[in-house]
Image (cartoon, rainbow, N blue to C red):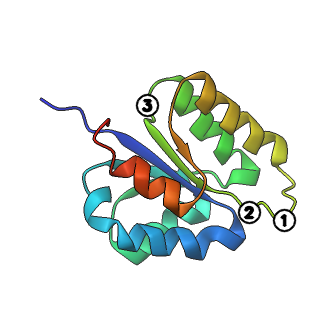
Amino acid sequence: MKEIKTVALIAHDNKKPEMIEWARKNKEILKKYSLCGTGTTSKRVAEATGLEVKGYLSGPLGGDQQIGALVAEGKVDIVVFFCDPLQAQPHDPDVKALLRIANVYNVPIATNPATADMVITSTLL
């Protein structure tokens, strides 16, 4: 039996509309995955698409760290994190820690829609 991969969805406030649009566009592909995400992002994607998205804490309240722990435990296979490179984030150390842990565990992390499209449609998954 084929294992269902888990995709974590995260977006900074200014990137949430972009994440929602990306998820709508890729709804049929995302149906094949188990989805999780941080706070508001998970709720808004679920509302906009009708997909089930398991929510964790908001990023600044520890959600980025929760997703990082899931990556370290082998429970997240892909991270889609639309970061806002033009605005300082008060929880920047948490963001950097998540990026680092994804690299340590060789988990693909897409930080923009073009990369996210390539990752979720890859035959390597």
Q: Check disc 2 and give the amino acid type.
A: Asp
Is residue 44 visible to us here? no
Q: Nearer the viewer, residue 53 or 88?
A: 88
On screen, residue 26 above or below 48 = above
On screen, residue 93 above or below 55 = above
Instruction: Check contact, mark 1 vs mark 2: CB within 8 A.
Output: yes
| Crowding at mark 2 (Cα within 10 Å: few <14, some 14-19, many 20+) | some
Q: CA distance from mark 2 to mark 3?
A: 25 Å
Q: Nearer the viewer, residue 35 or 105?
A: 105
Which residue carries the number 1 mark?
87
Residue 75: where, in percent of width, then height?
43, 31
Who's the residue at 53% across and 26% down the image?
106
Residue 26: where, in percent of width, then height?
35, 66
105 on left or right of 96: left
Who's the residue at 23% across and 32% down the image?
3
| Crowding at mark 1 (Cα within 10 Å: few <14, some 14-19, many 20+) | few
